[in-house]
Structures are given as C-alpha cells and as structure tokens.
Image: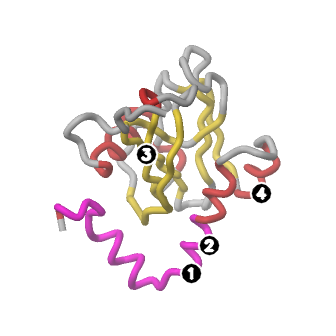
Amino acid sequence: MSVGRFLGGILALVRELENGRYLLLQRAASKDVGAGSWECVTGRVDQGESFEAALYREVKEEIGVRPQIEFIIGTTHFYRGEASPETDLLGVAYACTIPTANSIQISGEHDAHHWLTIAEIVAFLPNEHWLPPIIDRAERMRAAWPETLRDYFMERPFELSEN
C-alpha cells in the first residue's frame, strides 16, 4: 500500500453514572459509511485539534453534553470504509461518564439511541460487533484501577502538552 496520510479519530464510550448503562447510537441512514449500524460517539480529529478537544467537540455535537473523561481505554488503527491511504485512521478510545441519561439530545447524525447494560449490549449487538470487547476492557480497567489513580486522571487533561 502506498504511503498516505493518517487521520486521527476518537471514540467516546459514554456511561451514565446514575445506572451504569452505556450509550449506543444508531448511525443515520443518510451516513456514507456504516449507515444504520450501532456505535458509540465517534469522530475525526480536525487539523490543529488535539484528541481531547476532538472528543469534547464530538460528544457535544452528537449528544449535546460535555462528558467527564475517566481514562483512555486504548488506541486503534482502522479504515473508514474501504482500505486505502485516504481512509486510514488512528484512533484513541476514551471511557467517559455523564451524570444521567436524561441530559442528552441526539443530533441528526443518529436515528436512534439506547442506554443498555453490558449484558443487554451483548444480547442486542451481532456476535462479532467491535463494541463489546471495548466495553469489557473499560470495565476491567475501571474495576482494577485504584481510586487515587482514577481521581488523578479525572482531575487532569490527558493531552500531555496541557499538564
């Protein structure tokens, strides 16, 4: 494959604090890639924008709230559509929280949404869907991390240039 340019992307796994449920969004039928599929908040990093700034912007655009970032779940490499240098993305997955499900307003980027427990998500999504392993990883990280470390990350930006 020829050398192209990498695009940056974010994934915001949004969990409500009130009941511990996760937000699933159904991509609008009008979307060019993945129309009708279920996902969490995702988006691209704009030129000159940090990953963290992109996360806050995308969550605000897609569900109308500012989340609390808990931690970084991991990184990913994927293609937005067919594999080519123009669709090559590097992404950062974040675990985020909001106080309650009642505070969100879904944008036109999505046709539907559900707040579901992990068990409900596993039953709802197709067997090979990419989201359950990400949720499982976030849950394991959340359970294993000492509270002092979690508090440290929640009080500071993740962008190293801002610490």
Q: What residue span does the magenta drawing correspond to? A: 138-161
CA gap between label 1 and label 4 equals 20 Å
- The tag earlier along the polypeptide, 4 or 2, is 4
The correct choice, above or below, for 59 with respect to 106 in the image is: below
- The tag earlier along the polypeptide, 1 or 4, is 4
In contact (CB < 8 Å): disc 1 and disc 3: no
- Pointer 2: what residue? 140
- The tag earlier along the polypeptide, 1 or 3, is 3
Of 118 and 106, nearer the camera is 118
Assess whether residue 149 is covered by the magenta stretch: yes
* Label 1 Cα crowd, 10 Å radius (few <14 / some 14-19 / many 20+): few
Magenta stretch: dominant SS? helix
Assess whether residue 45 is covered by the magenta stretch: no
Name the kind of residue labelled 3 in the image.
Leu
Mark 1 or 3: the one toward you? 3
Mark 2 or 3: the one toward you? 3
Q: Residue at x 81, y 46 (%)?
A: 127
In this picture, residue 154 sits left or right of residue 28: left
- Pointer 1: what residue? 144
The correct choice, above or below, for 98 with respect to 3 in the image is: below
- Pointer 3: what residue? 90
Mark 4 or 2: the one toward you? 2
CA gap between label 1 and label 3 equals 26 Å
- Pointer 4: what residue? 119
